[in-house]
Amino acid sequence: MTWQRRLEEADKRYIWHPFTQMTDYQGMEPVIIEQGEGSYLIDIHGRRYLDGVSSLWVSVHGHRRGEIDQAIIEQLGKISHSTLLGLSNPPAIELAKQLVEITPAGLERVFYSDNGSTGCEIALKMAFQYWQHRGARNKTRFISFKNAYHGDTLGAVSVGGIDLFHEAFRPLLFPVLQAEAPYCYRCSLGLTWPACGMACLGSLERIMKEHHEEVAALIIEPLVQGAAGMITQPPGFLPGVRELCTQYGVLMIADEVAVGFGRTGRMFACDHEGVRPDVMVLAKGITGGYLPLAATLTTEEVYGAFLGEYHEFKTFFHGHTYTGNPLACAAALANLEVFARNKTLEHLAPKIDLLALRLERFKGLPAVGEVRQCGFMTGVELVADKETKDLFPLQEKMGIRVILEARKRGLIIRPLGDVIVIMPPLSISEGELEEVVEIIYQSIKTVIAS
Ligand SMILES: *Cc1c(COP(=O)(O)O)cnc(C)c1O
């Protein structure tokens, strides 16, 4: 037996893969990635694939980026981990300072954790306890949006709105107030933008008006609801949400786990419309896709409410073992350095335009219902009937068939149901980007024809 074969068998024998129907997985040839290089993933057979979804939305400057590799190696020469519970470390300090500098004004304090879900849990608990300390004991509830995704831990699932992922756990969750979210292609109010005047904001306003005295915070994915299928919000929606939060005394939590670090074309999605949230959650791209790290940032106002005498128990009783890990923070610092030194966002702008141009052609394909793009976040929604917008039957597994077709052609992507996601590393070259789009176009065409 070859060493490759041995690994493939051991993979199927021992690993339970996340978000994967293992019955299907057992019947497939596993792809085992051994190496990476720039925009490419390389498997144990030496086959090269373009990384079309940035290794699940994390890789920013590509794989084996010299500056980030080097920063981690240098940190390894000092220490790999020490706790942030009552102690500190240089990379965590320097990173906190830089995050405060680059995020929207008003965010002044950084609380670390190690993934997007915990980053959101922290935001929720922080907002909840803030109002308790302020004496507003009734402000215990949260507003979230239809189709929202904030992670897989139970608090994050409670504020989630994707029935497929979340419904099974409903008995374990706390109830939330759910507002309409814009999904203009399938507007739940049956309206059309911009003639609708963003009536979905009206639904939020009604909830705020009725319940604001019991609401601690609202949580939103700014500009794009990623996991729901790259659903983009019309301009004006995010500032409208900010305005309502301010008017009704509700903290605004911006979950920038997916959209942060350049994915939308600006460093943060909130930057596009000058929105200043009260709490911001960062993860995924924060280390350039190298190591698990998250940061929850908040204002001096929220932070200040937790100050007091030891015996008052105003302490924020939350923390994870690997919080503020020096290796991860060193990678994050190097990630920011590459952004600045290479003018990553400047170089990204023409690539975003190129992507938009190449996506035009998709609209002519029979099964393409809508193409949504916000910067480098793209979703191609497949439908059985363009007129009625009817979905394909689940048994057809259209999304999965398209990505398997793309795999044969040397591209790794992962769908969200029947939405094909394109989300390459920001560092991808124009030539590689053209190849990604072409492979997806041909793959969709092939699957529709069969
Ligand atoms: C991925 C994601 C999360 C969860 O992050 P994990 O690191 O997977 O726990 C939370 N919010 C948004 C918007 C995400 O896309």
Image (spheres, rainbow, N blue to C red):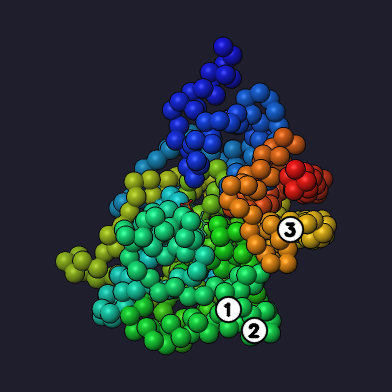
Amino acid at dot 1 = Leu
Q: Earlier in the sequence, mark 1 or mark 2?
A: 1
Nearest the camera: 124 or 395?
Answer: 395
Q: What residue is pinned by disc 2?
A: 196
Q: Pick the quarter of the image with the C terminus.
A: top right
As drawn, is 279 to the left or to the right of 268? left
Amino acid at dot 2 = Cys
Mark seen at residue 265: none
> Tags 1 and 2 in contact by the CB under 8 Å rule?
yes
Amino acid at dot 3 = Val
Q: Earlier in the sequence, mark 3 or mark 1?
A: 1
Q: Residues within 10 Å of mark 2 (few under 14, many from 20)?
A: few
Is residue 60 shown to the viewer in this render? no
Per the image, label 1 sits on a secondary structure element best described as loop
Q: What residue is pinned by disc 1?
A: 189
Nearer mark to the viewer, of 2 and 3? 3
As drawn, is 197 to the left or to the right of 11? right
Nearest the camera: 423 or 201?
Answer: 201
